[in-house]
Amino acid sequence: MAKDIKCVFGVDIDAVGGWLGSYGGEDSPSDIQRGMFSGEIGTPRVLKLFQKFDLPATWFIPGHSIETFPDSVKMIVDAGHEIGAHGYSHENPIAMTPKQEEDVLAYCVELIDKVSGRAPRGYVPPWWEMSNSTPSLLQKYGFTYDHGQGLHDFMPFYARVGDSWTKIDYAQEASAWMKPLERGEVIDLVEIGANWYMDDLPPMMFIKKAPNSAGWVNPRDVEAWWKDQFDWVYREQDYGVYAFTIHPDVAGRPQVLLMLERMIEYINGHEGVSWVTMEAAADDFRTRYAYPGPTGSPFMPGS
Amino acid sequence: MCVLCYELAPEDHWSDGVRPGEPSAPPLRDRHRRTRILAAVLAPYGLTVSDPGAGRHLTIADRKGAAEVAAGLPAVWEAAGRLSSRPLDPLDPVLLAALAEAGR
């Protein structure tokens, strides 16, 4: 079989919203300024990188970034990239009430439709956490794919919701917690797997309020991880989706931009590789493996 | 002070209470129980606690990404006071209602 490795850049403009909702920066003018850098400086730099290599990309833009950085968002739209949803202020879905979550999603869908002329098809749940309400909301608002579940890495799959597991409570008898995980239902929502090891932010963005924040990892080390993962996928799989998750907060810095250039050149040196939007990768997966129903396998046979 | 990690010796705090655990209880049992109670007390303030299971440290976090490592209960309450948007009060009606709801 000919190689068909689809490569995707998912770009989350967390920016100020990220500092408000996820990185503990709401009281720090310095952190908020870093968010401004992401939207006003980092985003055009990343766009220029894609332009240099003529790559399509999918930008998951929080509503806060859409409204705070209209000029940058217009540049993205004008360049023909796909726009997906990513919360308003990067709120954690499992911290919100169902009504709050729907209010955020509905407003962000409206914003994306307004700036791009098209409602979003793809979603990235902030923190990569889906709440119990998220799947039905995504279906209600017309989403066809998600980039948030971690059941697989370089093979798309259908989302499964409602998995349940038992926590250990040492005050109880052991029999109370010795229970296997129960799988939930597979839903008609394609997943492009979320993969922390393909994410630029945890290793390369310093977060003052996170006690375990790194932020100082050499991009050449990250490049080595990413190349190792690509090499393994290319050797072991004839088909797959190799998806980066990057943020202009991080990827807009010179040391990361240079690393991304080297990565793109490395990948482009392989036969059977293409660069696509995340929506195109998800649509292509549907043609390979139709939705199997709620009790079917989320995974394509052989994956 | 610990000569290896330069941490001050843990301070006692009234909220540590009296341990009802049996004398022969495994060493971690009281610790898990205390963490569970802390989680219930901090939840009404929008905070979480996680316990790495070793050392004296606990991590207290809010839901917007801010977190602090605290060693010992006095430090836990200080961290929680900084991270919560409301002052911590053992007689807070919201806290008492939440604990009653949890059946504690």
Image (cartoon, helix red, strand yellow):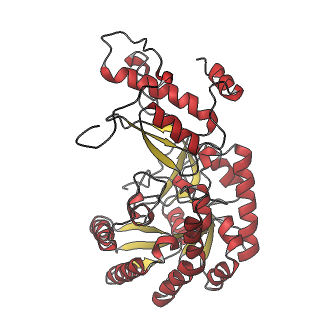
State the image coordinates of residue A115 (x, y, percent, origin top left). 73, 75
State the image coordinates of residue A88 (x, y, percent, origin top left). 67, 60
Q: For the C terminus of chain A, which image quadrant?
A: bottom left
In the rendered view, tell whether residue B9 sits above or below residue A292. Answer: above
State the image coordinates of residue B77 (x, y, percent, origin top left). 52, 35
Residue furthest to the bottom: A52
In the rendered view, tell whether residue A83 sits above or below residue A154. Answer: below
In the rendered view, tell whether residue B63 sits above or below residue A280. Answer: above
Q: Nearer the viewer, residue B91 or A280?
A: B91
Q: Is any atom of residue A256 visible in this view?
A: yes
How many numbered callouts? 0
Image position of B70 (left or right of A234): right
Residue at 60% from the left image edge and 56% from the top image edge = A21
Q: Nearer the viewer, residue A70 or B86?
A: B86
Which image quadrant is residue A220 in? bottom left
Q: Is any atom of residue A14 visible in this view?
A: no
Which image quadrant is residue B87 in? top right
Which image quadrant is residue A167 in? top left
Image position of A302 (left or right of B89): left
Image position of A62 (left or right of B72): right
Residue at 68% from the left image edge and 66% from the top image edge = A64
Image position of A80 (left or right of A179): right
Residue furthest to the left: B4
Q: For the N terminus of chain A, which image quadrant?
A: bottom left
State the image coordinates of residue A196 (x, y, percent, origin top left). 41, 58
